[in-house]
Image (cartoon, rainbow, N blue to C red):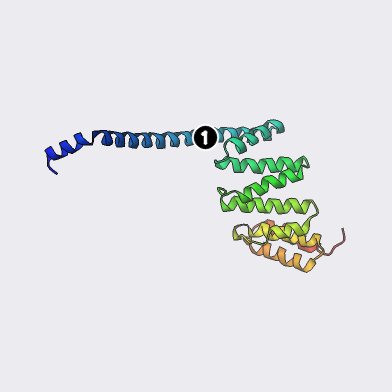
Amino acid sequence: MTGPELSEFLYRHRVSVIAGIIIVLLAAMGFFGYEKYQRHQVERAAVLYNELVDTLVAGQTSTARASADTLVHQYGHTPYAIFARFFLARMDSESNQIPAAEAELNSVIQAKNAPRGLKSIATLSLARLYLDQKQAQKALDMLKAPDAAFATLQNEIQGDAYVALHQDGKAMRAYQAAIAALPAADPYRSYLQMKMANIGVAP
C-alpha cells in the first residue's frame, strides 16, 4: 500500500480507526489502573496485618479480632487474609469457640489461593485442635495425606492420637518416623524420645 493509498484508507475508515485507538487506550488505562488498585489493596492489607500482630502481642484481643475480620472480608484476595484466619482460629480456640476455630482452619484448607504449605499448616492445626478436644480419630482422619515438608509434626500428632486411642504400637512407630525426619543433632528428638518412653506408662 502506497502513501496516498494509506492516507485514503485512513480517511475512509477514520471513525473505526479512532474508535479502535480509544478502545486500546481505555483497556490500557483500565489495566494499569487495576494494577495500581491491587498494589494499594496489598499495601493496606499489610498495614492492617501489622496492626493485628501488634495488638495481639499487646493483649488487645478485640482490636486484633477487628483487624483480622477486616482482612478476611475486605482483603480476602491478599495473602494477609490467609494469615488473619490463622490468628482468628487461635483466638477462637483460646476463647473456647471451637466450631469457629474449626471453620477458620477449614477455610484455609479449602482456599484456592492458599499455598500448599499454608494448607498443610492449617491441616496440622486442625488435627491438633481435634486432639485437644479428645477427638483422636478425627485428628487421624485429617492426616491421611502426607506432606514430607511437615513429616515430623504430622507423625508426632499421629503418635499423640494413637496414644489417646491406646494403640501403643502405632504410636511408637509414628514417633519413630517423626524422629527419623529430624536432623541427628536436633534437640527436638529428645522430646519425642521422652514421649516414646512414656508409652504404656500409667499417668
Q: Residues within 10 Å of mark 1 (few under 14, many from 20)?
A: some
* Residue 158 x %, y %: 72, 60
Q: Residue furthest right?
A: 202
* Residue 136 x %, y %: 77, 58
In which quadrant is the N terminus drawn? top left
Give above or below for 133 relative to 176: above
Give the residue displayed 71% in from the left and 47% down from the top.
102
Give the total number of marks visible in the rendering.
Answer: 1
Mark 1 = which residue? 41
Can residue 48 be seen?
yes
Give above or below for 139 relative to 93: below
Can residue 59 be seen?
no
Looking at the rendering, which quadrant does residue 203 occupy? bottom right
Looking at the rendering, which quadrant does residue 73 occupy? top right
Question: In the shown orientation, is residue 171 left or right of residue 69?
Answer: right
| Secondary-structure class at tag 1 | helix
Q: Amino acid at mark 1?
A: Gln
Give the residue displayed 66% in from the left and 59% down from the top.
152
Q: Residue furthest front?
A: 12
Question: In the shown orientation, is residue 164 left or right of residue 27?
Answer: right
Give the residue displayed 54% in from the left and 32% down from the top.
44
Q: Nearer the viewer, residue 194 or 86?
A: 86
* Residue 126 x %, y %: 70, 51
Give above or below for 57 relative to 155: above
Q: Nearer the viewer, residue 44 or 189?
A: 44
* Residue 80 x %, y %: 58, 40
